[in-house]
Image: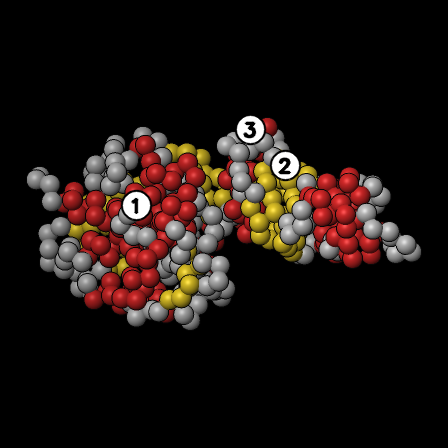
Amino acid sequence: MLIQITMQTPPAPAECQRVAIVGAGPAGLMAAEVISERGIAVEIYDAMPSIARKFLIAGVGGLNLSHAEPAADFVSRFGRRADAVGAWLQGFDAAAMQLWASGLGIDTFVGSSGRIFPTDMKAAPLLRAWLRRLRARGVRLHLRQRWCGWNAAGQLQFEHADGTTSVTADATVLALGGGSWSRLGSDGHWLGTLAAQGVDVAPLKPANCGFEVDWSAHFRQRYAGAPVKPVRATLVAGDPPAAPLQGELVITEYGVEGSLIYALAAPIRDRIEAIGSAELELDLAPGRSLDRLIRDLSASRGRRTRSEHLRRHAGIDGVQAGLLYEILGSAPDADAPVLASSIKALRLRLLRPRPLDEAISSAGGVRLEAMTAELMLRGLPGVFCAGEMLDWEAPTGGYLLTASMASGRVAGVGVLNWLQQPA
């Protein structure tokens, strides 16, 4: 259920400079905060009837603001865009996120996994406090306004129930989100609009998504929804080679999902695009060495069943045993060395990523090469972009939110610098 958060619209400031922000998610709101702090009039437009819907939904199970790992490790999570995103994070990193939340009266804590959460784990109180601060600075909000580009005079065009409105702005920040969760407003409709203006954009792709596997009907019916943990996974023949990651994956009717899969989603997706499929090497017993597992499985089975032998001597039971049977194609009757090797390096073939609209986030969008360091479009002076609509991606764990807000800050500072230039 969506939480409706409303904001009264105060009178517009009398300053002659006016900035339009299109998109009322975290990146857009952060840009509004930076710009309005200087007393400049800010108008925010959003197509939805309430703001930051994806932010609120993502926080239902506990709002993960950021991650407290070392800065170098944090930056490395952004893959091929690590250098660019790392530059954004110099102005707003995990520590800054905590200070920012504290300034809104929201206490935070670092969980055992290193993830940073509000003490009450909720998104709505933080968003309400943020909106109060923006309202106090004169920021005005316009909902149910769908951006549809520019008219011949260079004015922003917004469609709404009563027709179309033209808006003149001295600078614009586009923070329209990616292409996942279209029901919450991120539908990627802006891609064609910007491409028509000559902006270099990359196709939107699913990120932090599940992948399809050709399960048998028996395995699917019996184990869909079952978590496999702990398990260590390595992408076979990844480019560049990826280090093994340990965590949890979940069996689904269509294949696999879960935090471990999301962490590997980008290279898995790229591998599938390159050769048509990808293979994960699963270690179902990450706490035992191969030598130990061979010794354990070499013990006499006696009258015990194969399944009981696996459970007692290898810790393989339930869905893990089901995976062995499913992938090996028959009951694991092999001798101890072969069986142990299978447990430590079980090959799982992934066929396709799930559709973009099911993904937690998306990759692709406005290529960073089409922008200045301040995130202004080189071909459209005075137009800045921020957030998930840019061509970068991140795993779950607070990385996406922190970097989105950091990019909003960069764009906001860029607008301020742009407005100070002589006419």
Which is in the foreground here, disc 1 or disc 3? Answer: 1
Colouring style: secondary structure
Q: Is residue 151 visible?
A: no
Determine whether the residue tagged by mark 2 lies in a helix, strand or loop. strand
Q: Which amino acid lies under the numbered mark 1 shown in the image of this protein?
A: Trp
What residue sits 21% from the left and 44% below the top? 414
Q: Residue at x 72, y 52 (%)?
A: 320
Could you tell me if the residues under marks 1 and 3 are in contact, i.e. CB atoms within 8 Å?
A: no
The quadrant of the rendering that contains the C terminus is top left
Query: For this rendering, which residue is in front, 126 or 115?
Result: 115
Residue 12's spot in the image, x, y percent? 17, 60
Q: Position of residue 347 (x, y in %)?
A: 68, 39
Of residues 45 and 398, the one drawn nearer to the viewer in this rendering? 398
Q: Residue at x 26, y 47 (%)?
A: 410
The tag earlier along the polypeptide, 3 or 2, is 3
Q: Which mark is residue 350?
A: none
Helix, strand, or loop for circle 3? helix
The residue labelled by disc 1 is 88
Label 3 is placed on what type of residue? Ala
**Residue under pointer 2:** 279
Marks 3 and 2, how far apart at CA: 13 Å
Q: Can you tell which of label 3 and label 2 is closer to the viewer?
A: 2
- Count of labels in the image: 3
The mark that comes first in sequence, 2 or 1, is 1
Please tell me the numbered disc located at residue 274: 3
Query: In the orientation shown, which residue stands out farthest toward the top?
Result: 275
